[in-house]
Amino acid sequence: MPTREQRLSGLKILVVEDEFLVSMVLEDDLRDAGASVVGPFSDLAAALDGAGSQAFDLALLDINLSGTMVYPLADALLARRVPFLFLSGYTGADLPLRFAAHRRLSKPYDPRRLVEEILKLTPHP
Amino acid sequence: MSDVDAFALQPGIDAAAAFRLAGSPDYRAILDSLPAAIYTTDTDGTLTYFNRAAAEIAGREPRIGIDKWCISWKLYRPDGSPLPLEACPMAVAIREQRPVRGVDIVVERPDGGRVPALPFPTPLHDAAGRFIGAINLLVDISRLKSSERQVERHAAEQAALYRFTDRLCRAESEADVYDAALDAIIGALGCDRASVLLFDEAGVMRFVASRGLSPAYRAAVDGHSPWTPGDRDPAPIFVPDIMASDESERLKRIVKDEGLTALGFIPLTVEGAVIGKFMTYHDTAHHFSSAERDLAITIARQLGFAIDRRRTDRTLHESTERLRLATEAGKVGLWDWDIPGDSILWTDSLYAIHGVGKRTQSFAQWLDLVHPDSRADVLAAIDRALKDDVPYEVEVRTVRPDGADAWIYTNAVVLRDGAGAPLRMVGAAVDITKRKDVEGQRDLLVAELSHRVKNTLATVVSIARQSFAKGATLDSARKSFEGRLRALAQTHTRLAEANWESVPLAALIEDEIAPYRDESGNNLVTDGPPVSFTPKQAVVLGMAFHELATNAAKYGALSGKSGTVHVAWQCAADGTLVLDWRERGGPPVSPPKRAGFGRLLLERALAADLKGDVTLDFRPEGLACRITLPLGSAEASRPAA
């Protein structure tokens, strides 16, 4: 929606989501808010590759990628101090302890909440 | 007896002078005033003199010159057997002309009263040594006898109490305890009947043992109690005569019908609280002396103690047995951590739970068995227990030497020294691995369900966005959206039916094209081997077939009456599925100007989500769609939805 304020302008966001229809909406929402999308990656191997080779400011991670958990990428991002947000149907109690308190947005998400959460992760004003 | 001997005539007395003096009025007055009974006889035993005290002890007026041997009309031996007068000590003394000492007699009065007496018959000789008669001194020893009886009584009581204590120590059952108690009550308190009653679990006083009571009586008074369970330090209650008491008429009648008159209610207490009572029953009216009361309390104390000890023993025995069974079954272990000594003792069962052999172990060695994920929690809980006295209660994940995880629930108490420093932690541990496994499976299922539902909703949001995209009228957008939702729902129904494992390809296609089949059924033909889709494949392909079918119905072979759709598929050896959707006989086809949701789904979603490849060929005679899909790779990612 071009009329909306582009609050994520200039942000490069890595997207990992294994369902095309869902990632399509996510891409739309991010682009509408002015961000550019790195990915989307639908499996862990591709996501690890992409995260290692491309520049981005933060990441949105689906947790269950066709049965493979995204945790190795999450650990790598933690180590690199790259902020990320889980986008998932899982609740905190379902996650490993080290991620149970991590920022998480439940699917299906409200696009405005998504933008708010992303802004919380970034040093941008 | 030394007091009594003082009354005896002393050797060296001038007996003849005394005998003569007895006849003088002055001396007679002196003798009459003496509290001791004195009488004299001649040489053949005929009464020659008696004083007032003698008449009193005999209960009659003796007859001088007539009565022989004695002032009494009947005599008995101490054992109660009759003592003929001619065999009495005085008669012996006269016949054998010697003093007789130490032979008790019982004097019977004409009114039936009996007086125990100690006689001192002594032969009298004149100055020339001639036998002239005899003098007897009778000492009333009824008071002495009664205190003797008391001494005997006391000794009997002590013996009864001793036997009671001894039997309580050796009692092997509660019945033994009650039996010993009844013997002691009857033996020591001298009552005719006795019983023991205890509060049952409902707080009702029940007979547990009795002697001499009829079943009817026990049934009638069962539950009757002057006290309620737990009353503190009550006093015994003694009813000397039930008919003179203020008990209910009903109770009086019951007691009387049983032939009882006097009742004693003696409370049995444990640490001051009433647990029951014992009863003493007398058939006739009975005044309960303070000695009886003290004795009853002594017996009650012993009995209460014995009952309590047996109960404690039984409870202890039962709990020990339960503990043994539980620990032997390997489900419960006990541990004891000597904190200053840094050593932990385990029961055998706990070694079994941990899967390690017996050993001496330090705290650090134990901590090695705790899974790294659990260590911080465990250490924090121990810290709180030691420092803040917070109850220690944790679920610990441990690792067995064989590598298997075991979950243990454990709780413990901290034992401290006088200054409050922790000395030991003693706890119980239960193997909860199975419960944890079940919980884990349940959590996994719930998590999966949540994941699937929310992903599906996210998909619905996406479908809605596409359906209501620019260009479509609201009405057609709504129809498209609802159709797509139905297709999605239908696939989910298929998945639910198959326990979320797989859906046959034929069923997916059939679900979407069935609404367009004509009466002959010839307009739709499917042809291919059985193929199963994973849930993820099924969801995407179900939507894809829906798009193909609705497109055919709107613009293609199914929009008229003469068109046909032929769907054929086959599986290559490498697990690649090739499916051809061919339309014929519809209106002439031209490539669409704009890519709608159907094309997006077919060309991009299949590629992205299923690694599939789709070619759409808009031939004039009808649409030809080929879907190429690696089934193998998709199957490898089976758990996903």
Image (spheres, coloured by chain):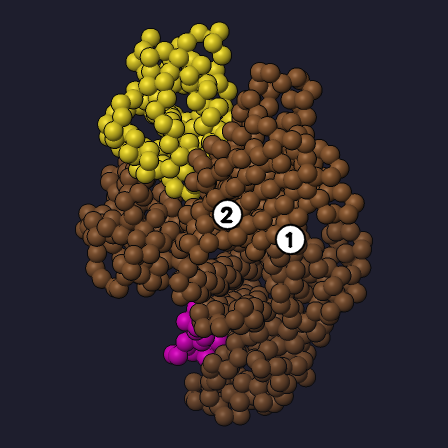
Chain colours: A yellow, B brown
Residue placed farthest to the bottom in the image? B96
Q: Residue at x 41, y 47 (%)?
A: B633
Residue type marked 1 = Ala
- Res B55 visible: no
Residue in front for this viewpoint, B493 or B243: B493
Quarter placement of the N terminus of chain B: bottom left
Determine the secondary structure under disc 1. Answer: loop
Q: Residue at x 49, y 38 (%)?
A: B614
Residue B473, above or below B86: above
- Res B600 visible: yes
Q: Which residue is mark 1?
A: B202
Q: Which residue is mark 2?
A: B578
Residue B215, above or below B548: below
Q: Residue at x 25, y 29 (%)?
A: A53
* Left or right of B431 in this view: B157: right
Residue B17 sits inside the magenta stretch: yes
Determine the secondary structure under disc 2. Answer: strand
Residue type marked 2 = Val
Q: Where does the image place residue B403, in percent across and percent down from the top left? A: 29, 56
